[in-house]
Image (cartoon, rainbow, N blue to C red):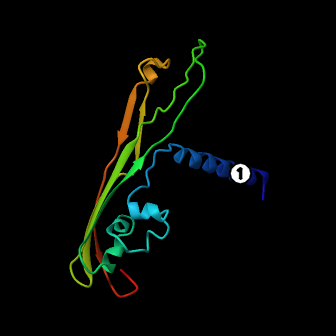
């Protein structure tokens, strides 16, 4: 392998590694789409058909339900975010508990039509972020209140080909 090829491959690998970390650095993804899933730490959510909430992750699970099923819940989030530092002029930028508490609701419904067909609907939130700085915060215009909320409306259907494929 030539030096030029080795350098090109190495540079590409480093660039991909650096770009990948930026994609996950936002830190405001919410995984709380069902209360029962949270209780299991979301292990096996793509294969366990014990409540309608799992269908939002894997619509093929609709075919495993034999009657209409409804699931709803809410997860309470109580973040503890504290910041510290000083401004260029020497003022303190310390602020405690800048992220407010929040409820993240979810609702799911599954309705089998027959042994082969079914449909489902889900309402969840994938992302959310909020900050509240008090009026005396030294950051001035960068302080204040921010609020980012999302809603995911999911309508899905499923068809079972046989016992192994749906």
Q: Where in the figure is residue 125, as x and y percent of width and height?
A: 35, 51
Q: Is residue 100 above or below residue 85?
A: below
Q: Is residue 53 above or below residue 113?
A: above
Q: Which residue is mark 1?
A: 10
Residue 149 quadrant: top left
Q: Where in the figure is residue 158, as x and y percent of width and height?
A: 29, 75
Residue 49 quadrant: bottom left
Location of the C terminus (image quadrant) = bottom left
Residue 78 quadrant: top left
Left or right side of 68 for 84: right
For the question of whether residue 155 can be seen, the reply is no
Looking at the picture, tell me which residue is in the foreground, 77 or 27.
77
Number of residues whose C-alpha sits closer than 10 Å to that of mark 1, classed few (under 14), some (14–19) or many (20 or more)? few
Q: Where in the figure is residue 35, as x and y percent of width and height?
A: 39, 60
Q: Is residue 151 above or below residue 165?
A: above
Left or right side of 69 for 127: right
> Residue shown at 47%/32% (left/top)?
98
> Residue shown at 60%/24% (left/top)?
85
Q: Where in the figure is residue 123, as x and y percent of width and height?
A: 29, 57
> Residue shown at 40%/49% (left/top)?
76
- The residue at the far top in this view is 89
For the question of whether residue 28 can be seen, the reply is yes
């Amino acid at each position: 392998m030539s030096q030029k090829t080795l350098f090109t491959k190495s540079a590409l690998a480093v660039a991909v590694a650096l770009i990948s970390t930026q994609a996950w650095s936002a830190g405001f993804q919410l995984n709380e789409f069902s209360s029962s899933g949270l209780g299991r730490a979301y292990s096996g959510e793509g294969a366990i058909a014990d409540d309608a909430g799992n269908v939002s992750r894997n619509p093929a699970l609709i075919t495993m339900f034999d009657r209409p099923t409804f699931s709803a819940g809410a997860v309470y989030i109580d973040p503890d975010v504290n910041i510290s530092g000083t401004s260029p002029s020497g003022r303190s930028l310390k602020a405690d508990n800048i992220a407010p508490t929040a409820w993240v609701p979810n609702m799911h419904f599954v309705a089998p039509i027959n042994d082969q067909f079914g449909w489902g609907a889900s309402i969840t939130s994938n992302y959310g972020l909020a900050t509240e700085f008090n009026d005396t915060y030294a950051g001035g215009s960068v302080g204040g209140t921010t609020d980012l909320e999302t809603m995911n409306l999911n309508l899905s259907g499923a068809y079972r080909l046989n016992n192994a494929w749906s």
